[in-house]
Image (cartoon, helix red, strand yellow):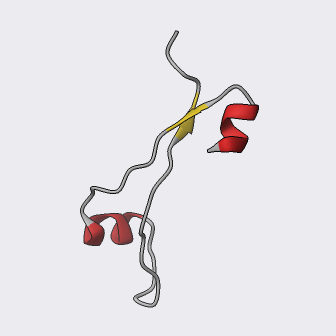
């Protein structure tokens, strides 16, 4: 998130989501878990 800010980008931590759905979309094996997602993009003006 610090690197995103240094590049003039916005980011936000997302910790509330459907674990099974995210794992399915990302095609993760059962050994992997998603604990936190950080979307990065251009901030609103």
Q: Is residue 2 above or below residue 29?
A: above
**Left or right: 11, with 21 as reference point:** right
**Left or right: 23, with 39 as reference point:** left
Rendered image quadrant of residue 33: bottom left
Residue 43 position in % (x across, y down): 54, 22
Residue 6 position in % (x across, y down): 75, 33
Residue 25 position in % (x across, y down): 38, 63
41 and 11: which is toward the camera: 11
Q: Is residue 30 above or below residue 15?
A: below
Which residue is most to the bottom? 31
Which residue is most to the front? 2
Q: Is residue 42 above or below residue 2?
A: above
**Left or right: 32, with 7 as reference point:** left
The number of callouts visible is 0
Residue 20 position in % (x across, y down): 27, 72
Give the residue drawn at x 42%, y 70%: 34
Give the residue drawn at x 28%, y 65%: 21
Give the residue drawn at x 61%, y 45%: 1
Give the residue drawn at x 46%, y 56%: 37
């Amino acid at each position: 998130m610090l690197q995103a800010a240094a590049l003039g980008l916005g980011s936000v931590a997302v910790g509330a989501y459907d674990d099974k759905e995210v794992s399915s979309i990302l095609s993760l094996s059962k050994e992997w878990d998603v604990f936190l997602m950080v979307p990065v993009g251009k901030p609103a003006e």
